[in-house]
Amino acid sequence: MPFIRFFLQKTFFTGCFLVGLWGWGQPSLLEGVNDTLVKDDLGEVSDAFQDLFFKAVAQYGIENYEQAIETLKKSMPLAPDPTVIHYQLGKNYWALNKFDEAIKAWEKVQDKRPEDQELLALLFEAYRRQGKLDKAIEMGAKLAPKNSVYFLKLAKLWLRKQNEEEALQNIAAFEQVEGGTREVDSFRQQIYRETKQPEKLMQYLQKQSQKEPLNPQNFKALIYLYHLYKKPDKAYLAALALQELDKEAREVPLGLYPHYIEAGETDLAVSAFKKLLSNRQDEQLNTKVLEDFKQLVKKHPQYKEEWDSRVSGVQTEEQLSNRALAEQYQKEDPQKALTYYRKALEETPQNFNLLQETLLLQMQEQAFEEALTLALQALEYFPTQAVFYLIKGKAENALGNYEQAEQSLTEGVGMVIDHPSLLEQFYQALEETYKNLGQDERQNYYKEQLKTLKN
């Protein structure tokens, strides 16, 4: 039977219970996680225990967390099994932002319920938010077999630990269950673009392609990496292998055309360009391909007609002009600039620089609702980019959503590496958040962090 759901007598404290679990002040961490402790799990309990316990539930419901904690502690000696008390203590500690105490309380519950999925989910989020990545990964590994979304969450955690191999393995595990999606493919390509160890990643993918010679994904990944890091001969060989498995794959011409250019086989290169530019799955890549095509035409003007006919049908040129217009109007008419940025984003929603430029202008123009929506979208494509967490948190501060801002900012600040100016902005935003939350101790902590950083 699932645990941490209270089976109440029909008329006993029902209203207070519902308020306590689902009403005011519930920590955002607990959203979507049902309390499931059945009364049978408690055993026979005394009236004195029930009175104290449900009083604590009521106090939680009206956000009187400190008093709820004291009441729960008083009920502890009367409880035949303290598991439910520790669980409720964890909720109240979390609501007070006493995260370490919350984790300690929930860990005591886990000692009794090591495989309970709902508790594992709470601990996963708690560890993740506190930056305890190894513990979060341990919880996620237990959750993923029953809930495949945790494979993607694990991939993001492994990426934060700069372990691209584990991240890719978890993406592959997700796709085995759910199939491929454009968003997941974008996440994978982000890993390829941002890796600090491209050679190591290439070696890993080479081994994977030898282990699974009939899996086209390994060859697609290798072609993408070889293209990014200018290894045309290796890209060519990978493209030939992929061609036998999936001749329609977009990565086939991507791997072929640089080799054709080097070999002087310009007709074949142009044919590959045409195939690539008819597929608009990755507009950032299309822009690079267009540039290579343009350079080929400069050296071989006989292909200008091919260039003109192909580019006239590629909307990337329009996107670039939209962006250019946005940059042109940015100072003299910011609202008009935002209109052009929106048009450009409709066509290239995964362009990192374009997302960042648009978000910064939205914040400048105090379009906080728009900025919050776009920051969420940006984090879907770039889940490890601290700057998008910063903008999201600042937008939430501006909208008065301080608890959400705290979550965004504390998650993002842990991703900042060797970037003092970005760290300073996080500290400033967190100081503002805790000031508005009335948490003087945390506010002063970030004040001191700012002084230390500036010195």
Image (cartoon, grey):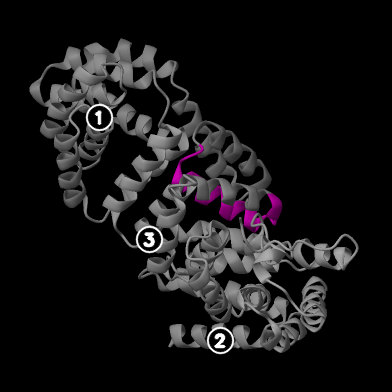
**What amino acid type is highlighted by mark number 1?**
Asn
Residues shaded magenta: 349-369
Mark 3, residue position:
160
| Callout 2–callout 3 Cβ contact below 8 Å | no
Which label number is shown at residue 445? 2
**Residue 416 x %, y %:** 42, 67
**Residue 433 x %, y %:** 65, 74
Determine the main secondary structure of the stretch shown in magenta.
Answer: helix
Of mark 2 and mark 3, the one earlier in the sequence is: 3
Q: CA–CA distance between discs 1 and 2?
A: 51 Å
Above or below 378: residue 291: above
* Residue 333 seen in this snapshot: no
Q: Residues within 10 Å of mark 2 (few under 14, many from 20)?
A: some
Q: Nearer the viewer, residue 86 or 262?
A: 86
**Residue 336 x %, y %:** 66, 41
Above or below 332: residue 436: below
Horizontal side of 177 relative to 236 (left or right) equals right
Q: Nearer the viewer, residue 324 or 166?
A: 166
Of mark 1 and mark 3, the one earlier in the sequence is: 3
Mark 1, residue position:
215
Task: Give the secondary structure at mark 3.
Answer: helix
| Callout 1–callout 2 Cβ contact below 8 Å | no
**What amino acid type is highlighted by mark number 2?**
Tyr
Q: CA–CA distance between discs 2 and 3?
A: 25 Å
| The image quarter in which residue 261 lies | top left
**What amino acid type is highlighted by mark number 3?**
Arg
Task: Give the secondary structure at mark 2.
Answer: helix
| The image quarter in which residue 44 lies | bottom right
Horizontal side of 250 relative to 122 (left or right) equals left
* Residue 24 seen in this snapshot: yes
Q: Residues within 10 Å of mark 1 (few under 14, many from 20)?
A: some
